[in-house]
Image: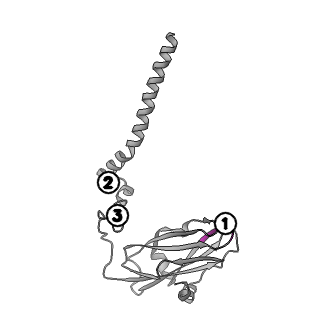
């Protein structure tokens, strides 16, 4: 009997400890974020506030408002599926964060895995076109008929040569496991730009 009483006490103590650990685990995330905001040691915590259009976004002092760059978007599909940018072009200042969506649909009757390869015109713009988020970083699997939208978030380096006023970002979307497309040339995006709209 005494042994059962001790076991029951131990179970209660362990339940209290487990409950305390559970509550502490949930409280840890806001505590961590608050400490990081106060000390400024975590740039990820600060970056969450700098969402475009957010009321708490701090102005970016690196934006060159004296220049405007037109970025044109082109899409090429190597296979029977739909792939296009949601808009044909945007105008941005060097240093300004911009996001553009691309639309995808698998119109085949089977599941497919696919990936996109980017290319740039003029070619020297590639070194100054910094993608922070891009569907081209990963392969994706699409079910038959499935539609998706994926973003491209980018910043153009203010060190972009002054004579470059228009950049064409072209993507070739191809099925993984299928025939690999030829490497795009600097001329390819300009030749097919009108068809990708």
Q: Which residue is mark 1?
A: 111
Tag 3 and tag 2, C-beta contact below 8 Å: no
Q: Is residue 157 magenta?
A: no
Element under disc 3: loop
Residue at the image point whose x is 55% and y is 84% from the top: 196
Q: CA distance from mark 3 to mark 2?
A: 14 Å
Quarter-of-image position of residue 89? bottom left
Sequence-first disc among 3 and 2: 2
- Camera-near label (3 vs 2) is 3
Residue 173 drawn at (x, y percent): 60, 75
Residue 20 drawn at (x, y percent): 40, 33
Q: Nearer the viewer, residue 70 or 185?
A: 70
Label 3 CA crowd tier, 10 Å (few <14, some 14–19, many 20+): some
Residue at the image point whose x is 53% and y is 74% from the top: 103
Q: CA distance from mark 1 to mark 2?
A: 45 Å
Q: Which mark is residue 50?
A: 3
Element under disc 1: loop
Q: Which residue is mark 2?
A: 40
Sequence-first disc among 3 and 1: 3
Q: Is residue 117 left or right of residue 86?
A: right
């Amino acid at each position: 009997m005494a042994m059962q009483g001790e076991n029951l006490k131990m179970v209660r103590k362990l339940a209290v400890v487990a409950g305390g650990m559970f509550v502490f685990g949930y409280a840890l995330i806001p505590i961590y974020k608050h400490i990081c905001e106060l000390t400024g040691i975590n740039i990820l915590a600060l970056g969450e506030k700098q969402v475009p259009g957010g009321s708490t976004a701090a102005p970016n002092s690196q934006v060159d408002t004296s220049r405007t760059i037109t970025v044109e978007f082109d899409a090429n599909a190597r296979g029977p599926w739909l792939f296009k940018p949601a808009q044909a072009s945007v105008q941005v200042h060097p240093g300004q964060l911009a996001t553009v969506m691309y639309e995808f649909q698998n119109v085949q009757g089977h599941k497919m895995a696919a990936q996109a390869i980017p290319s740039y015109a003029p070619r020297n713009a590639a070194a100054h076109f910094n993608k922070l988020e891009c569907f081209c970083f990963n392969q994706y699997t699409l079910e038959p008929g499935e539609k998706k939208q994926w973003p491209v978030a980018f910043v153009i380096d203010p060190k972009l040569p002054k004579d470059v006023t228009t950049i064409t970002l072209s993507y070739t979307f191809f099925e993984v496991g299928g025939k690999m497309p030829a490497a795009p040339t600097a001329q390819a995006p300009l030749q097919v730009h009108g068809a990708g709209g």
